[in-house]
Amino acid sequence: MSPSAAPPAEPPLSARQAERRHRILRAATALAARGGYEAVQMREVAESAQVALGTLYRYFPSKVHLLVAVMLEQLQELQEHIRRHPPTDREPAPRVADTLTRAFHALQREPLLAEAMVRAMCFADRSIGAEVDLVSAATGQLILDAIGQSGPPSDSQRAAVRVIEHTWHSALVAWLSGRASIAEVRADLHTAARLLTLP
């Protein structure tokens, strides 16, 4: 789509709207953490967030939209934590591996929430493309922050970041489905991060 054909940007939320949206996300997060994907029912989210069901649907047209937004919020919170407590290794590859391993452990503490968010990402269709792109961008930025260099990344670094991002999501799916152990996930993340050392 050309820039001229792009839809207009959404107006910023008022303070009241932002607070309502935050309540909705908190309610969905709590339900998912207790019962996984199936536990996130829109009516229950609305009741827990103390909003009308119609209001909820204006913010999030479907459960998938809602849980993708929850995943974005989780990644943004993780970004803030990593920025406050950055990895200390001198080389970029171990810093990236450490960052993604810490991110994985954060999700591991809430496996039902992780399952709900990942299932939503897997179910997302083109109607949720913009939201999925934001999740991808947040994951990529987490990796770029871990590299810790000044200035924009090179083309080879951008390519490596994309592969590392794909590996991260694939490893998470494999762990959630019982096809990979935590040790295997950690090994895969370290292997992918070593792409940053290639010329």
Image (tube, rainbow, N blue to C red):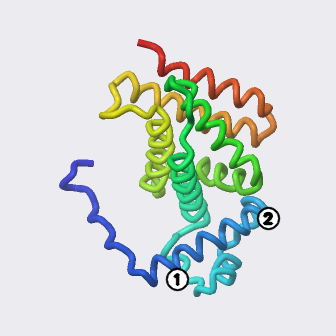
Query: In the rendered view, does 188 fall on the left or right side of 132?
Result: right
**Identity, as a three-letter code, of the amino acid under mark 2:** Arg
Foreground disc of the pair 1, 2: 2
Q: Picture coordinates of residue 83 (x, y %)? A: 50, 47
Which of these two is toward me, 137 or 97? 97
**Identity, as a three-letter code, of the amino acid under mark 1:** Thr
Q: Picture coordinates of residue 96 (x, y %)? A: 55, 31
Residue at mark 1: 55
Residue beneath the point at 42% across and 26% down: 159
The numbered mark, 1 or 2, whose residue comes first in the sequence reads: 2
Which of these two is toward me, 178 or 97? 97
* Quarter of the figure with the C terminus: top left
Callout 1: SS = helix
Give the alpha-carbon distance from disc 1 to disc 2, as whole Å.
24 Å
Residue at mark 2: 34
Residue beneath the point at 28% across and 62% down: 7
